[in-house]
Amino acid sequence: MEHKEISRAVIKRLPRYYRYLGELLEEGIERISSNELSERMKVTASQIRQDLNHFGGFGQQGYGYNVGYLYDEIAKIIGLDHKHTLIIVGAGNLGQALANYMNFERRGFLILGIFDKNPELIGKKVRDMEIEDISLAAEFVKKHDIEIAVLTLPKAGATEVVGNLVDAGIKGIWNFAHVDLELPDSVIVENVHLSESLMKLSYKLSRGEDLE
Amino acid sequence: MEHKEISRAVIKRLPRYYRYLGELLEEGIERISSNELSERMKVTASQIRQDLNHFGGFGQQGYGYNVGYLYDEIAKIIGLDHKHTLIIVGAGNLGQALANYMNFERRGFLILGIFDKNPELIGKKVRDMEIEDISLAAEFVKKHDIEIAVLTLPKAGATEVVGNLVDAGIKGIWNFAHVDLELPDSVIVENVHLSESLMKLSYKLSRGEDLE
């Protein structure tokens, strides 16, 4: 199916649809009407029909959407229909938390290595992986054709490490470090600045209005 | 100073300015020109001048901005000029990672308690806090006038716990649980849906374009 006609506004809503459709599948629900989905997602049924009609002739009156079909189609668009290989760079609390988070694996994000520069951490086991010396990360990326590096290290070391990973061919960075990375256009970055998120909450609490 | 005239577009950029100004202070830099700040932040100097001119007559030619003054003014707007009290609900890897993250404390976010329902975790120490039974969380919120609950627990238990916290007077939720919370309008929510963030990265990698 050709997806290029789907608007960016719809695309932006797909991860949320994907999450809800996944929950339905877990509950064993194979068909759902736009009204029922509207009820769950707190989105109008007409919005849902408009959004999901992009995916073919499903959702006829009284028949409902095929949950599994929609789930798979959305997965293809988001790029979840194939595996992604990851390493975690920075094995502190946050890095270990992400390494232990099984849901990523279920969605095809395979964490294959975890690295740190702290000698006290190196050799320690996280899940079924041994924490390795950060100086080995770039080589690992090359050897195992790693696509994504999860950056969970202090900003001090981040820039240098990232440079090495980019040279080694990393394609995407999921950045939890408190730094704005300067990267070639070919490398994709998704930032998770937790303290900025907390500041947004603080702003909303102080001002009673949203920052979005 | 009256801040109501500052546009939302500027407000949205404040957490990032705040981060950079904080870094300058750490480096002992007390004054900075719009050109130097532009260099660091990869934002045009004219944008910076436009944004920061809201904060009074600083930044004259050849004199530069007073870093500490701007930092404090922005803190006031974001609500970082006073302390916020927090509890963490869910003491798994992510909850413990956030509890151990000292930077939040430095910015006035005081984590006063951490709770879980897992008997194996209860009683264990995280930083200088003992993990307590989740059934005690609401009472703790009342007794210590807790403002913010950090939700780092599986979605299964989230809705019930949140209901109790709201009844106990919680004002804000920093939500890491994979669930869209239904809350009274008076309670402020900031969502961090990590798997949706990872999906955005996956989308960008697959399609070569941004979801923002």
Image (spheres, coloured by chain):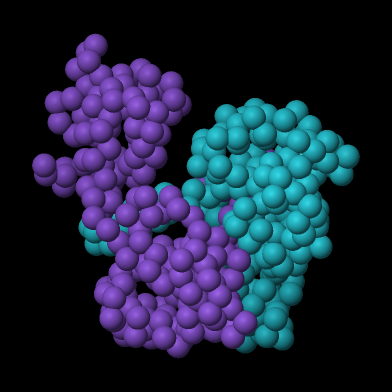
Chain colours: A cyan, B purple
Q: Is residue B178 above or below residue A206?
A: below
Q: Residue at horizontal 53%, vertical 80%? A: B123
Q: In terms of image quadrants, where is residue B14?
A: top left
- Residue A131 appears in the figure: yes
Compare residues B195 and A163 and report the one nearer the observer. Answer: A163
**Residue in front for this viewpoint, A147 or A56:** A147
Q: Is residue A56 visible?
A: no
Residue at far top of view? B62
Is A171 situated left or right of A202 in this image?
Answer: right
Counting from the top left corner in percent of width and height, residue A80 is at 74, 58
Residue A27 on image: x %, y %: 68, 85
Instruction: Provide residue A60's location: percent of width, then percent of height.
Output: 64, 79
Q: Residue at x 49, y 48 (%)?
A: A193
Vertical relation: B91 (above or below) A109: below
- Give the quadrant of the N terminus of chain B: top left
Residue at screen point 60% across, 35% down: A157
Task: Specify the quadrant of the image occupied by residue A97.
Answer: bottom right
Q: Is residue B63 above or below residue B91?
A: above
Image point (25%, 33%), residue name: B68
